[in-house]
Structure formats: C-alpha cells, structure tokens
Image (cartoon, coloured by chain):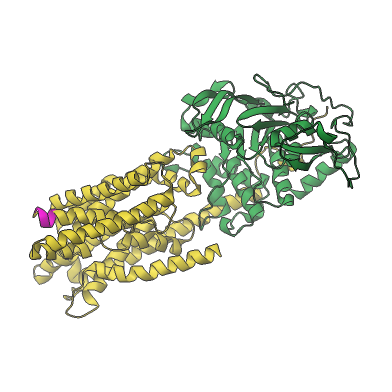
Amino acid sequence: MSAPTVPAPLTPAAPSTGTLAAVQAGRTRSRRRTRRLTLGLLAVLLVAAFARVALGKYVVAVPDLLAVLAHDYTGPADYIVWQITLPRTVLGILTGMAFGLAGHLFQRVLRNPLASPDIMGVSSGAGLGAVVAITVFGLSGPAVTLSSLVGGIGLMAAVVLAAGGTHANIGKLVLTGVAGGALTGGAINAVLTRADIYAAQDAMQWLTGSLNAASWEDIARVAVCLLVLLPVCAWLAPSVDALGTGDALAAGLGVRVQGVRITALALAVVLVAVAASTVGPVAFVSFMAAPIARGLGGGAGHAHHAALVGAVLMVVSDYVAAEAIPDLALPVGVVTAAAGAPVLLWLLIGRGKAEA
Amino acid sequence: MTTDDKDRDTVTENSPRTTATPHAPDGPARAGWAASSPEMSVRHLEVGYGGAPVLRDVSVTFPAGRVTALVGANGCGKSTLLKTCARQLTPASGEVLVGGEDVRGWHRTRFARTVGFLPQDPVAPEGVSVRELVSRGRHPHRGAFGRWRAQDDAAVAEALELTGLRELVDRQVTDLSGGQRQRVWIALALAQQTDVLLLDEPTTYLDIARQVEILDILGQLQRARGITLVMVLHELSLAARCADVLVALKDGVVVAQGTAAEVMTDATVGHVFDMRARVLHDRVTDARVVIPLSTGAARPGASDGSPVASQPGPVPVPSAPCADAPPGRTPEAPSPIRADDHEVSS
C-alpha cells in the first residue's frame, strides 16, 4: 500500500533557474525583434512618405518642405504639398494600414494565408456597392462609402450564410468566398456594360484603385474609422492569436471561438470597405501585407506589422505608379496587382516546401 | 526524463508496480496536491449530433487526483464523452460536474482555469517557437489586451521542464518530430495550470516508444501535481499500464469501470470490442496484454478462447486474469469509481 515514489525532479516547486532564464531570455529576444521591426518599418514608411510628398514631379527641398508643413511658406510648393502630394500620401498610409490589418485578421482567424478579403470577394462586394452607387444612382462622396460598406458586409454575410452559418468549416468558407467574389466580379461587369460611358469610366477608375482624388475629407473619414476600430483590434488580438492553434484548443483556453471569428471578420470587412470606398479595392495589399510582415519578422506575425507593411506598400506603389513611366501616371492598383503575383507564387512555393 | 524512468524501473523490480491499490480513493493522500484537485463527473448525460444519441444516460465519476482512461471501440462515444466534459459539446440533457458543481453556469475563463483540454488534432501555427506556443496556455490567466506577468513565465518554464523540453525552448514547433510536438502540446496544457486535464488520444500517430514516453511523462506529472487526469486511449495495454481507473464504453453506454484488474478480463474486453480475446497478465511487471483472437460475435463459451493449434506464448495464463495477481491486490476491492449506473459486462 505504499504510495508510488515521486521522482525527485518532478516536485511541483518553482522551475530551475535555467529554464526560467531561457524562457525570459526568449521572450525578451522576441520582444526586441518585434520592436526592431516596428521601428524599421516606421523608418521605411517615413522615407517613402517623404519621397512621395517631396520628390514627385515637382521637387520640394527639405527646408521648403518644413516651412510648408509649418504653414510658413508662400509659393507653388504650398499648394502642391497641401492639396496634392500630402493628402495622397496620408490617405495611402491610412488605407494601407486598413488593408494590411484586414488581411491579417482574415488570414489569422481563417488560418489560411490565401484567405484575404480581396481574394475572398469582400473587395468585390464593396466594389459592386460602389459601382451601383456611382453608375445607377449617380452618387458620390460619403454615399459611395456607405454603399460600398453595405456591399462588402452584404457579401461577407451572404458568404457565411451560404457556407452554412457561423459554425461552417473554414475551407468551405474560403471557397464560398472565392466563388462569391467571382460572382460579384461578374455582376460588376454586367452593371458597367449597361452604364453610361462616362459614369462607367469613373467607376472603372475607382475599381482599379487610385489615390488621385485624395482629399482631406476622405482622410478624415478613414482616420475616424481607424481610431474607432484599432483599439477593438488590439483588445481582440490575444483571442485572434489563440485561434491559430485550432478551434477546439482555443475553446479549451476559454476563447469564444465563433464570436471572436465573426467579430474579427466583421472588423476586417468594415476596414476594407471604408478604405476601398475612398481609394477603390486596391488589389492584393490585404493579401500581401501579413505574409510579408511575417517573412520580415519571423514568428507568427503581429497585426501592427501587417498594418505598417500595408501602409508602406500603398505609399511605395503609388510613388512607383506615378513616377516609374514618365508622362504616364498609372493608378496605384496596377502596381500592387503586378507586385501581388510574385508574392502569391512565393507563398505557394514556400508552403509547398513547408509541407514537403 | 529518461533518468526518472530508470528510477521507477528499479522500484518496479523489487515491488511490482501495482496500478490499482495505492491509488484507491481512501488510500494515502499524496503530497497534499491531490486533495486540492476536484473530481469530475457526469450525470445522466445524453449527447447526440442531431441523429441518434451518441451517449445514452451516461453517469460516471473521474476520481480526484487519479488517472482515468476512457477505452472502447471506434465510435463508442469515448471522445464524445471527453468533449462533453470539456464543454466542447453541449449535452441534450444531463450535467457535467466539477467538484460536485454543475459547470453549465461557469464563465468560460473560470472553466478554462479549472479544466484543461487537449484535442486530438491541434494546429501548429507556422513560425511559432516552442516557448511561444506553450505560452498560449496562459491565455485564460491573462488580463485584458493579454498583459504578461512574471508568474506566466514561471508557469511556462515549469511546463517546459516537466515535459523535458528545456533544450528545445527556442526551436520552431513545425521543425519538431511527432513525439516532441506532442510534448509541446502537453506542456501547453500544463501551462494552463488546471486541476483537471482532459486529453483526447494524446498518443495517436506515435510509435510505441514515444507512446510510452508520453504516458510516462503524463503519469509523473499527474503524481507530481496530483491533478485529475482523464484521457481517451486506444491502446488497451498502455491504458492498463498508466491508468488508475479504466472506463469502457460501448454504443454510448458505460459497460465496465474499475481497475485494470477488474476491466481487463477476457469477457469484458471481448464484449467491449466485439472480439474474442485473451488478456495475459505478466506477474513481474503487472502489465496486461490483449491477445486478439477473432472478431465477430464474442462467444466466450465456444472453445473457451484458447487458440487451437499454435500457442507459442511462454506464459499460458489461465483465463481468470487476476488469479496470479501479487499479494496485496484484491480484485474484489471496491471500485474507485462511484458506479451509480454501473452496467457490469457479462
């Protein structure tokens, strides 16, 4: 009747200092790495933003730029910076952050690097909403924002319902999203072919994604939206990360799995729809941002890195689109679409290797 | 952990490791830890996935501070029972109790701090280190926005040490072997620091040595912490080796429960798996091994389960498996399980 011998090293006392130190050191290291990447991305974003603002067709010298920003300058640079280059840069940063964050949320809660809002049809849904508003009802401004919001949320809701509700299998959800996106793309074309030619051209421009029409009103709209949604994202982040280990384990850790997934998807849809309503459904930024952030930082990837990468992608792509070919200003969506294809290939090849 | 195994082996040589008696509920309390862990039980549980019920009026208690193994054929409802205990499935009727308290009203966080659950197929996220993955076990203990505190580090370090992962702290989980990865998942569950731990087939996809390794680690952890451990196990011999209590299910009903000596009999094993089988008992190691004879209707009367022609086994054990049990083992000892609705097999 003797109790079994408890092996000495297994006393439930404090762990040996070696393991504890290794755990603490590992955490410190990864926190430092995270901070380094954040600072690095901020620096790159600053440089890109400076180039976009001051090194366009009309070059503004640094002292002049500072004077302009301080409202202490009169001359053409004042108009160029405040009315053209600065708004499109700021709007690029804000919408890039929204796209990047939305992509991160989608890919994380659906556990699939290909499941971004642009690939799953949310952007097409927002696009359909906007195209209908522009061509059929002749609307503009906030009405288009609202219409594309309705389109994006409507499409996502339809996809979730068609896939079988909130408890749907993730693979089914992603595939339904892709199908929904294709359907919506067809609907956009149908609306465009029946639309008035000038309205259709407006709509086409918007659909490609462009920062040309950036205005401070757009910026205010996107900024307010981000200010409201970012704290919610930060609050949701630990639960969103916990979903990465599978629904059953996450539920065992006390995560409200379906609630977190639906909330995160809804947040992402609103982010995409608001951003897309001002600059159009810029292709592949949502899709690229999080995988690039993960590739740069290692680890599981952080939401704020994905947001910063999205911002950098938007600003750099816009700069390239405007300046790469002399006398031909391309919309930003053309460049991001061209950049997206190699990233898609890289992801597929990388995943193939990981599974081999 | 290998050194610990050796320590235990030497003990076993002198006094055969008796799985049942030392762990009897009224036996000596172990190190004060066992007393703090609650028992888990289910009462009149009915669970179904829409169609016919998978569990039918199941009532069973998993004793506090003991290891319980759920065994049974594929589709018998053992995984369903475990998932219902983990609140992954909602029962149609009946209740799940922890320490006698119905958990239905518990907040998710409270439940996750009391009952840990390791599912059969967790997903290893890409690019995550062992330390980061194990840290996720701290989720129910963290504050708003996931604040990290010193005690979280200590819990993670303890879990890593207990599972022998000290050397792998910074490795990528996706680079590990199956056995190492399974240890990482167990460490995650340990970092959760729950009094009750439910494991759904923790040894699937592992080779025999890795299975034994995982079960030995779990047994040591259970003894060190005195937690209430319940697992679904496929391999009967391993279940008998590591569990204080075996609960056998068939067609959604508990058909046998008790110590390995009580449950691992020719008749019970044959009934549970619809298969003629002999259970051999090794006196030296107190291990029990199932020899499958034939599937189909189990007819214990016909030919008395003896293989006809070739019987190369060196130990022709008589069919009563506990007749040769070492002294001190009493097969008639009361079951550590409170059997309210105990259906005894023929």
The tally of labels here is: 0
Q: Is residue B15 left or right of residue A256?
A: right
**x%, y% of residue B291?**
80, 42
In the picture, the quarter occupied by the C terminus of chain A is bottom right
Q: Farthest residue in the top direction?
A: B340
Q: Is residue A50 visible?
A: no
Q: Which of B54 and A348 is in front in this view?
A: B54
In the picture, the quarter occupied by the N terminus of chain A is top right
Q: Is the magenta stretch mostly helix, strand or loop?
A: helix
* Figure chain in yellow: A
Residue at (25, 70) in percent of width and height? A334
| Numbered range of the magenta stretch | A133-137
* Figure chain in green: B
Q: Which of B47 and A8 is in front in this view?
A: B47
**x%, y% of residue A315?**
27, 66
Q: Is residue A261 left or right of residue A14?
A: left
Queried whether the magenta region covers residue B149, the answer comes back as no
Instruction: Please tell me in which quadrant of the rendered image residue A201 appears.
Output: bottom left
Q: Which of A180 and B319 is in front in this view?
A: B319
Residue at (18, 77) in percent of width and height? A328
Q: Farthest residue in the bottom direction?
A: A326
Instruction: Please tell me in which quadrant of the rendered image residue A323 appears.
Output: bottom left
Instruction: Please tell me in which quadrant of the rendered image residue A128 appears.
Output: bottom left
Q: Which of B288 and A316 is in front in this view?
A: B288
Q: Can residue B34 be seen in this view?
A: yes
In the rendered image, the vertical position of residue B118 relative to residue B90, given as above or below: below
**x%, y% of residue B195?**
61, 32
Q: In this view, does B25 lie to the left or right of A256?
A: right
**x%, y% of residue A245?**
50, 48
Q: In this view, does A137 lie to the left or right of B216?
A: left
Queried whether the magenta region covers residue A136, the answer comes back as yes
